[in-house]
């Protein structure tokens, strides 16, 4: 709070002070009051007014400066009321009360919105688990009558199952802290489960696999890591180059402070202009429009979950040649689970 701006705001009060002074001075002159007495009255009058303005300014300045400073320091601005003392001047008390009522109303609305979101999340999760039962039955029937069914039918059922998983993990992605169980995970085990899940597509696509994980273990959540790898491998299959023999190489390397899991394919690659945007929400890019329909959500969810778990996702590509996806895990005492 600046003195100059405060005085400008008080200009009507200051004009009234001068007007009252000149009226008083006029009366004193009319009644032939001694000039020395007039000077004394003038001095006392102006000193009193200056003192009143100064006291009022200091009280307001202390309150509003603290308010502004605390707002600037807070990430969650609505908590500012908890950081300031109730002011001693009447205007400040009114302002403080208004802030309290606004904060209370906002808290009630936020609480209601959170409850509505939580109810919706629970309903979606329940619905997904229910709908996955008939999808699993359909997949089982497709395997049992594989020779009698068109392979496109099984392919569409698998796509449906994958999209349902995406919906489930997207809904949970804002609540992952409640669902995480970070512990030592075998990369070989997780990758094996993902490859088994996609074995039919891998065989039909005639993709050669090279896996070298050297019994490496990382600290992660097995369920979420399996989803992440499934999305990456599905992308490798989806965007394979059908004009040449396709391969997917999965390997890991241990460094002093990190473990790097790499998934490399020789598919159609990602155009350079799209590379920095592939993890953006709903971004499909050139490949998503030209080769196959894409939701643009897979890598967005993958990147979001990696950040939540403290992993780093890196994607590099040479258009028309290859794509490399790296997941970097921490390998230091910060990640070690205390027993």
Image (cartoon, grey):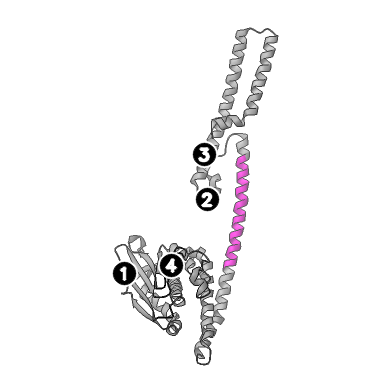
At x 56% / y 34%, what residue is drawn? 60
- Label 4 vs label 1, nearer the camera: 1
Residue denoted by label 4: 181
Relative vertical location of residue 114 with respect to residue 296 in this rendering, above or below: above
Q: Are marks 1 and 2 in contact (CB under 8 Å)?
A: no
Res 185 seen here = no
> Does 235 appear in magenta?
no
Furthest residue to the bottom?
A: 148
Mark 1 is surrounded, within 10 Å at the Cα level, by few (under 14), some (14 to 19) or many (20 or more) other residues, namely: some
- In the rendered structure, which disc, 4 or 1, sits on the residue that comes first in sequence? 4
Which residue, given by chain and number where applicable, does mark 2 sit on? 76
First of labels 4, 3 by sequence position: 3
Inter-mark Cα distance, 1 to 2: 41 Å
Compare marks 1 and 2 and give the one earlier in the sequence.
Answer: 2
How far across and how far down the image is residue 171, in percent? 54, 67
Residue at (51, 43) in percent of width and height: 70
Question: In the image, which is nearer the foreground, mark 1 or mark 2?
Answer: 1
Extent of the magenta region = 95-121
Which is nearer the eye, 141 or 283?
283
CA distance separating discs 4 and 3: 42 Å
Q: Which of 50 and 6 is in front in this view?
A: 6
Mark 4 and mark 1: span between their CA atoms? 24 Å
Q: Residue 253 carries which label?
A: 1
Front residue (pair 67, 7):
7
Pair 1/3: label in front: 1
Question: What's the magenta bit mostly, secondary-structure-wise?
Answer: helix
């Amino acid at each position: 709070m600046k003195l100059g701006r405060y005085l400008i705001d008080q200009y009507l009060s200051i004009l009234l002070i001068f007007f009252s002074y000149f009226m008083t001075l006029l009366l004193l002159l009319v009644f032939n009051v001694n000039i020395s007495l007039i000077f004394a009255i003038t001095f006392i009058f102006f000193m009193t007014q200056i003192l009143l303005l100064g006291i009022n300014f200091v009280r307001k300045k202390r309150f509003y400066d603290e308010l502004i400073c605390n707002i600037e320091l807070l990430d969650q601005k609505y908590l500012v009321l908890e950081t300031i003392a109730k002011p001693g001047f009447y205007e400040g008390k009114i302002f403080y009360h208004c802030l309290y009522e606004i904060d209370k109303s906002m808290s009630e609305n936020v609480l209601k919105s959170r409850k509505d979101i939580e109810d919706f999340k629970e309903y979606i999760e329940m619905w997904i688990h229910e709908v996955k039962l008939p999808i699993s039955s359909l997949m089982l029937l497709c395997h049992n009558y594989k020779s009698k069914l068109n392979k496109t039918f099984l392919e569409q059922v698998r796509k449906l199952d994958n999209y349902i998983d995406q919906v489930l993990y997207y809904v949970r992605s804002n609540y992952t802290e409640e669902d995480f169980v970070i512990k030592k995970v075998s990369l070989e085990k997780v990758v094996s489960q993902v490859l088994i899940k996609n074995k039919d597509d891998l065989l039909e696509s005639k993709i050669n696999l090279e896996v070298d994980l050297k019994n490496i273990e990382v600290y992660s959540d097995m369920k979420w890591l399996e989803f992440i790898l499934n999305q990456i491998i599905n992308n490798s299959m989806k965007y394979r180059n059908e004009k040449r023999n396709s391969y997917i190489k999965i390997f890991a390397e241990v460094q002093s402070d990190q473990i790097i899991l790499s998934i490399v394919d020789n598919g159609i690659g990602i155009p350079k202009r799209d590379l920095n945007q592939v993890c953006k929400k709903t971004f499909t890019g050139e490949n998503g429009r030209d080769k196959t329909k894409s939701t643009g959500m897979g890598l967005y969810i993958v990147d979001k979950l990696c950040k939540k778990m403290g992993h780093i996702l890196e994607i590099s590509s040479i258009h028309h040649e290859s794509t490399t996806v790296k997941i970097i895990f921490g390998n230091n005492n910060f990640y070690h689970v205390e027993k």
